[in-house]
Amino acid sequence: MPGESGYAHLPVTKVPGWHGLIAWDALLNGMATGLFMAAAVSELAAPAIFIPVAKVAYPVALVLLLVDLALLVSDLGDPLRFHHMLRVFKPRSPMSVGTWCLVIFSLPLTAAAGLSVLSEFGLDFEWARRLAVVLGLLPGFGSAAYKGVLLSTNAQPGWKDARWMGGYLTNSALLMGCAELLVLSAMMGQTQATVILRTAFIVLLVLNVIPLGLLFADLHPAHARLYTRGQQWLVGILIFAAATLIPLSLTLLSGDLPFLSGAVIFLLLGSWVIRFVYVKIPHTSPLENRRSE
Amino acid sequence: MASREKELSALLQTSDPPRGLLSSLVQRLIYPFLHGEPPEPRSPTGFYTDTTVCIGCKACEVACKQWNQLPSDGFNWSGNSYDNTAELSATSWRHVKFIEQFSDGSSSKRASLDDVSNESDHNRWLMMSDVCKHCLAAPCHQACPTGAIIHNEFENVYIQADICNGCSCCIAACPFGVITRDPVGGHSHKCTLCYDRQRDGLEPACAKACPTQSIHFGPVDELREMARKRVEELHRRGVPEAYLYGDGASDTYSELHSFYLLVDRPSVYGLPDNPYNPWLHMMGDYFRSIAGGLAAIAALFVVVFLLGS
């Protein structure tokens, strides 16, 4: 607070300056990696049903990943030095692990997307496409899993206590990927795939409540310092409604495209709000400071 | 003479940047991957700052700025005692803190002339020259994905400015709020412990300039011994609250190569009471992250496999 003497009331750590871009990055990262993994798992589990929709999903995942990478690079202090990330591999640095996973993942994803597009023009290299899908699974999973660890392994207030951030984000990536795949299959008129993915989506929505609840419990002390009880309840209810209740209700109500699209839009909206609220924590002044101002 | 200078400047220097767009691009791409031979390890060095003899003259701040050619931050009244530097930043690698403690127990009361003359345990100024702690297991070093942050041959935490790409992971990781990203260049900066001076056998500029020997520089082992003797001396002289901060490792944080003699709680000086290395949680966080993902993959696979077949 300006004019107050001493340092005990001041925050010790400095905020890294990761703002809205990082919330979008966390969302797009989950959407891209989740879509790839959901398509790959579905294709490998039931190829006869899922190959057509998977062939559309891979190019979409690639576009999402490219947008995400552009955001990541533009958020650097010196974007022209992005390639410096590749001069070392440090297992103890989540950002280093994530960068390498993303770089490696981009290769099989590009191959799977390219070969899927080529097959539409009669150039079918099915074995190569299938190989690329299998090879992409591990780095794709790593690309989804590192983000939460990066956002919890640090000294920032709130973030440092979020033990379930990684668990939530990785689980959420698969949920969002399943949701995207569901809409794609509904748009393509793949009835059998839509029916199966609708069930899977409902299961994953319910499953996702567990890491989300654990993350909320982790963040409760930080939120109590930043927001009033009323604000916490309001945001909590909005998030739970948008990210879980409304998508669940719409999906249970009907399997038609408008309902499914609505469910997915609400899910993505809720997922973005969760990431945005999380990223905001170290950038928000404690409640007592705001009151005295 | 002038023509000789002209002649010399026309010569191609090995350190000259490449000319032409293509060679410049190639240089930019290749340069960061060129790793030199690491120098031979030397005796670990650091700072020991005795805050009880600091007089708040800010000579250390000035010497640091001058030697490292750091630009001015402008002048702003912070309203916080005589502290108008406010914080460590990309352009302020030393920061002298002023804490006013007076008999009514309030730290927000302004000092009157009477208060100042009546200095006792409850009427006192605390001053401290803050700097990077050069942690032995530095979270910034662990976080850095480019390898820009290294422990140099003196075991000081050093940012290679030509490698840093401004990802800010180090800023998020530092529990002391030391590192800052320069808004102009976009790279992270902090105290280098005057690496260039040390290589030439000189002590850091701040320690050299300190008129009261509040800032000591030297081999860390010697500094620790000196600091412990000083604490004992202060205890004998009726200052039982004197203690060393960062002298040894705790359960949650490594020892600091820049440590302090304090006479009040760390938070009074703007230091974390119990610094915590975020990396203690990393394996658990990875486990939860992987478990969360695997649970979702397993659920998806089971549903697709059962309904699909």
Image (cartoon, coloured by chain):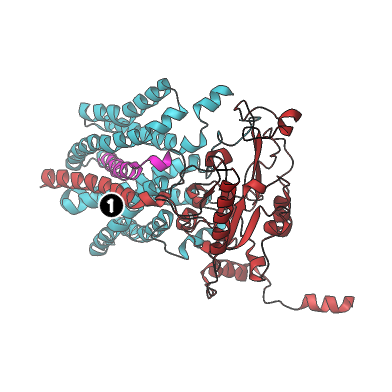
Chain colours: A cyan, B red
- Judged from this view, the residue extending furthest toward the front is B236
Could you say which is closer to the camera, residue B230 or residue B191? Answer: B230
How many residues crowd around disc 1 within 10 Å: few (fewer than 14), some, or many (20 or more)? many
Could you say which is closer to the camera, residue B16 or residue A283? Answer: A283
Residue A57 lies in the magenta stretch: no
Q: Residue at x 18, y 37 (%)?
A: A199
Residue A183 lies in the magenta stretch: yes
Element carrying mark 1 = helix
Q: Residue at x 57, y 48 (%)?
A: B236
Residue B230 relative to residue A241: left or right: right
Please give the residue where the numbered disc 1 appears in the rendered image. Answer: A55
Q: Quadrant of the N terminus of chain B?
A: bottom right
**Residue span colored magenta:** A158-185
Q: Amino acid at mark 1?
A: Lys
Q: Is residue A51 visible?
A: no
How would you classify the magenta stretch by its main secondary structure?
helix
Q: Is residue A96 above or below residue A285?
A: below
Q: Residue at x 57, y 45 (%)?
A: B262
Mark 1 chain: A
Q: Position of residue B106 (x, y in %)?
A: 61, 27
- Judged from this view, the residue extending furthest toward the right is B1
Q: Is residue A113 above or below residue A208?
A: below
Q: Position of residue A55 (x, y in %)?
A: 28, 52
Q: Find residue B225 and report its image quarter.
A: bottom right
